[in-house]
Image (cartoon, rainbow, N blue to C red):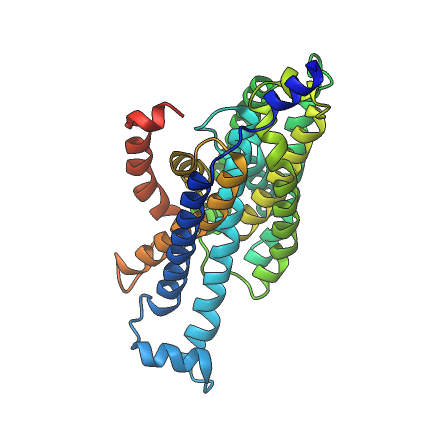
């Protein structure tokens, strides 16, 4: 009897068909928003092209420079934006679940700091100059950074449940501060290094080397699969480690799985687009306002709405200073900060 009661307590509460219907309807609307963002990303740019020309470039390209701009540059840019947005949205939701902090950011695991430091070191020590050379360095740094933070947080009193959320957060913040300081020092000492890195550090989905999307897609897919596997256990862990263990859930294994998923997703996204702020912070927080505390729905909505936000920010960056462009990494704080402040100040959001 006690085991049955513990099982019932640890599992997420049953939902009526009406709320589930609302969530499905909302998910359909989110998919529609994403499709609209994809259309805008392909159709609009600093070079204004008629819609019939855009359509011809997609369906019957003639090899002209105009058609190549649409069929290659804009489509590749859109695909990279989709992958990066989905990665950061899901990673943000996972790290907020792991730390039990609705305002946590994926960079808290040291992923962004590790990636940035690896790229800085590569430019300073090995003369790396091309974005395609940044990709393996960035991903390796992201993996190493997350592994160090997780192992350091697991030491001492980490216990059989893996690293405690507070330890993970504090060590991640300290590690990020140290690596960021070292990276900035190296960049300031060598101005040429800073100039080479400036565009990548700003965060952008444009001018990526050919094959970027294909290179990061396997890591993104693997991270999403691990995230799906962790979704239901996270609902139990949200009610407390003891309740989760009472039904036989391996809390430490779940936390390790979350760290692996966040590392794969954030590492791939940072390698491709540089560090993008606010996506993994703002979107899951806003999604929780719509879906409630069920992490299965939060992860699903985040995977759909986060790429839509990235693509819309990228489109706005192309238009606000035409014919020049602003990187999406510059536009995201401009868009995200006011939205996040509004969300945090909202009465309903504060109750989540």
Position of residue 44 measured from the top left corner of the image (x, y, whole percent):
33, 67
Viewer-closest of 234 and 7: 7
Residue depicted at x 66% and y 42%: 226
Q: Quadrant of the C terminus?
A: top left
Position of residue 230 measured from the top left corner of the image (x, y, whole percent):
63, 36
Decide: is 168 above or below 28: above
Q: Answer yes or no: is residue 319 visible.
A: yes
Position of residue 167 measured from the top left corner of the image (x, y, whole percent):
59, 18
Viewer-closest of 308 and 50: 308
Residue depicted at x 57% and y 31%: 109
Tell me: 348 left or right of 113: left
Decide: is 9 above or below 185: above
Decide: is 28 above or below 214: above
Dividing the picture into quarters, in which one does residue 95 lie?
Answer: top right
Viewer-closest of 26 and 127: 26
Decide: is 153 above or below 340: above
Q: Answer yes or no: is residue 145 visible.
A: no
Viewer-closest of 289 and 285: 289
Count of numbered marks: 0
Residue depicted at x 65% and y 55%: 218
Specify the farthest residue to the bottom. Answer: 62
Position of residue 17 measured from the top left corner of the image (x, y, whole percent):
47, 41
Q: Quadrant of the N terminus?
A: top right
Dividing the picture into quarters, in which one does residue 97 lie?
Answer: top right
């Amino acid at each position: 009897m006690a085991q049955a009661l513990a099982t019932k307590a640890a599992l997420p509460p049953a939902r009526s068909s009406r709320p589930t219907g609302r969530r499905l309807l909302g998910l359909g609307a989110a998919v529609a928003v994403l499709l609209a963002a994809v259309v805008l990303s392909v159709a609009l740019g600093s070079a204004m092209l008629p819609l019939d020309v855009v359509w011809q470039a997609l369906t019957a390209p003639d090899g002209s420079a105009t058609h190549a701009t649409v069929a290659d540059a804009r489509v590749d840019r859109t695909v990279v934006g989709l992958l990066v947005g989905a990665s950061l949205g899901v990673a943000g939701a996972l790290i907020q679940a792991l730390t039990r902090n609705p305002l946590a950011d994926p960079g808290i695991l040291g992923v962004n700091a590790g990636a940035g430091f690896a790229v800085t070191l590569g430019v300073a020590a090995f003369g790396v100059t091309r974005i395609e050379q940044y990709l393996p360095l960035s991903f390796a740094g992201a993996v190493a950074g997350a592994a160090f933070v997780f192992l350091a947080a697991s030491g001492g009193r980490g216990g059989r449940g893996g690293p405690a959320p507070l330890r993970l957060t504090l060590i991640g913040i300290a590690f990020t501060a140290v690596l960021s300081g070292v990276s900035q020092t190296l960049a300031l000492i060598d101005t040429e290094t800073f100039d080479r890195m400036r565009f990548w550090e700003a965060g952008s989905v444009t001018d990526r080397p050919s094959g970027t999307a294909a290179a990061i897609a396997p890591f993104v897919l693997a991270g999403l699969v691990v995230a799906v596997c962790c979704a239901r256990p996270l609902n139990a862990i949200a009610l407390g480690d003891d309740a989760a263990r009472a039904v036989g859930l391996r809390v430490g294994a779940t936390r390790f799985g979350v760290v692996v998923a966040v590392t794969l997703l954030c590492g791939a996204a940072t390698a491709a687009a540089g560090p993008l702020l606010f996506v993994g912070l703002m979107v899951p927080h806003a999604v929780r306002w719509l879906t409630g505390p069920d992490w299965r729905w939060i992860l699903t909505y985040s995977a759909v709405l986060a790429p839509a936000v990235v693509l819309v920010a990228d489109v706005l960056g192309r238009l606000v200073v035409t014919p020049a462009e602003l990187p999406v990494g510059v536009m995201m704080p401009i868009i995200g900060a006011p939205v996040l402040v509004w969300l945090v100040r909202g009465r309903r959001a504060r109750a989540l």
